[in-house]
Image (cartoon, grey):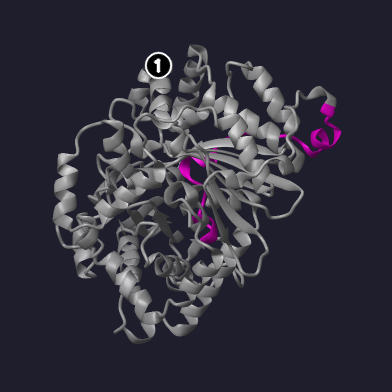
Amino acid sequence: MSNQLWQAAARSGKSLLKQSPIGWKASTASLLSRSRTTLQQPEEIKPKAFDAAKYPTKVQEFSKSSTGLSKVTTLPNGVRVASENTPGHFSAVGVYVDAGSRYESPANQGVSHILDRLAFKSTKTSSADEMLSKLESLGGNIMCSSSRESIMYQSAVFNQDVQQVMSIFADVICNPVIAPEEVEEQRQTALYEIQDIWSKPEMILPEILHTVAFKGNTLGNPLLCPPENLASMTPELIKSYMKTWYRPERMVVAVCGTDHNLAVQLAEKYFGNIPASETPLDSVKTHRIIQERQTKSASFVQSLFSSTKTNSAESLATQPAHYTGGIELVDAPEQMFTHVQVAFEGLPIHDDDIYALATLQILLGGGGSFSAGGPGKGMYSRLFTNVLNQHYWVESCTAFNHCYTDSGLFGIAASCRPEYANVLLEVICRELDLVARQDVGHLGVNKVELSRAKNQLKSSLLMNLESRMVQLEDLGRQVQVQGSKTGIDEMLAKIDAVDLEKLAQVASRIVRGAVSVTSGGSGDATIVAQGEVRGINNPRKILEKYGLGSGKKTW
C-alpha cells in the first residue's frame, strides 16, 4: 500500500508540495464545448491489434468482490506498465519516476522542488503556451508533484483522451527544453512559495520534523529548495539530475480505467524508445536493497550509514534512512498559537506491523476545536475525548503517520494558546504512553474503541479507492516499490487481525524507541515547535516521566 493511500484513509492533509500543485482544471463549460477539430490528436491506436502478453506480465486479482484485475507488464527497456481496468467515464493516467528529495546530494538539494514546477513548460515539440493550450483543451485534472521518494505526473481525463495525455507526459518527461528564462521564473516563484509556507505552521512543521528526525540524510533532505540553493538551480544541473534518475527502469506508467493491451501499446509507443540504462538502477531492486539493509542489526546499519558518504547514483539509490531524532524550536511570537509536534521513528511500508500502526492512528484520531465531528468523523477518537473535549485551551490535536520505503514517523501534532505550551507537551506524551500500556484499566484502549477504529480504517480505505486519482497513485507507487500490488482483500484481512494485545505491542514498539533495534536509529523522540516557544521547558524530563523514547540523549 502506498503512503498516499494511508494518508487519504486517515484523512490527513495533502503533502507539503501538493498544497499548490502544478495543474490545470478546465471549466465544465469548456469541457462540454471543446471542439475536437482544434486538437491535434495522435493517430488512434486500437487495443485489439496488440497483445501485451508478448512481454513479461503479472496478473493479480485486486479484490474477490470485483471482476477487475491488476496487470503489470515490463517493456524491454525496463519501463513498467500497470493497469486496472475498472469501468467509468474517466480514466486516470500517471507516470511515476523513482526520484525525489531523498536522492538529492548537497550539491543539488532542492532540485526536485524546481523540477516539478518546470513540468508542462516548453518541450522540443511545443512551446510553453502550446503545451498549456493542449492541457486546457483536454480538461480534467492534470498535475505534477514531487515527494521524498517519487516525482509524479498524474491526470484524470475522458477515456478517449488517454492517448493524448500519454503523449503529453512522454513529451514533458523525455523532451523538456528547460530554458533559462523558465528556470529563473520558477526560482522567483519558489522563493515566494517558501516564504509563504514558513508563515503557516501546519505546512512547515512537517517539513522541519523530517529534517530534524533524519538529520543530514535521505528522508531528512528538504522538500522545499533551500533559499540559498536557488541561485545554483541552473538548466544544466536540472538536466543532469533528470539524466541520472529519469531512467526507464525507474519509471512506472500506470493507467486505471483502460484496457491493459491499449495501455501497454501506448506506453511502448511513447516510452519504449527511451534507451535502456547501461548500468541499471531498477527501482524495485534498489528499494529491496534499502529494505534489506534497514532490517539488519543496528550496529551493521550504523556502520553502513557512517561509511556511505559518496554521492554516486548507486550509493544514493541504496542508502537506507537513518533516524536521529532531536529537537528544534522556532520562535515566532507574532503567531496566535504555539504549534507542537512530537514524533518517534515509525515503520516502513513493508513492515507487518504497519496495519496495527494505521489502526492506532485512526484510534487516536483528533482534529480541530471547531471540527463538526459527528458519527464516522472521529468524534469518539481518543484525542477528541481525552484532549479536545477536556482542555478548552487546545486549538487542535491530531495523530499522524508518515510511511516510507525503509522508515517512517508516527506522532501527534497539536496547537494551543502560548501559555499552555509546556502543558500541551505533557498531554501529548500522556496519550502516547496510555495507548502503549495494558495495565491502566479503563484509561487504556478497550475493545469497543479498537473495533470502531478498525471499521473506520477499512471503510476509509475502500471509499478512497473509489477515487480514480487515489487508485492510480496507489497502483503506481506500489508497482514502483515492489513490482506488484497488495490486494485490498489482503489489507482488510490484516486489519481484522489486529487485537488489543497487538495494538499495545506495536504502540510500545514505537513510543518506547524499540524500532531502533532493527533500524539502527537513535530511538529518541523528535520534538519541533513554532510560535511562542519560550514556555517549553525541559522536554527531555517530560519524555522520561512517561518512559518515551530510548532514553539516549541526542540533543
User: With respect to residue 22, does 353 lie above or below?
Assistant: below
Q: What stretch is highlighted in magenta?
A: 7-36
Instruction: Please name the residue that numbered disc 1 is placed on.
Output: 236
Can the viewer see residue 194? yes
Q: Which residue is drawn at 44% across and 38% down?
A: 250
- Across and down, in percent, residue 20 comes to 55, 37
User: With respect to residue 446, does 384 lie above or below?
Assistant: above
Q: Residue at x 76, y 23 (%)?
A: 40
Figure quadrant of residue 208: top left
Figure quadrant of residue 195: top left
Q: Mark 1 is on which residue type?
A: Glu
Q: Residue furthest front?
A: 54
* Depth order, front residue of 239/378: 239
- Across and down, in percent, residue 66 comes to 66, 65
From the viewer's perspective, tell me whether residue 363 is left or right of residue 231: right
Q: Which residue is drawn at 63% across and 16% down?
A: 127
From the viewer's perspective, tell me whether residue 76 is left or right of residue 88: left
* Depth order, front residue of 486/10: 486
From the viewer's perspective, tell me whether residue 350 is left or right of residue 78: left
- Across and down, in percent, residue 107 comes to 29, 25
Q: Which residue lies furthest to the bottom in this view?
A: 441
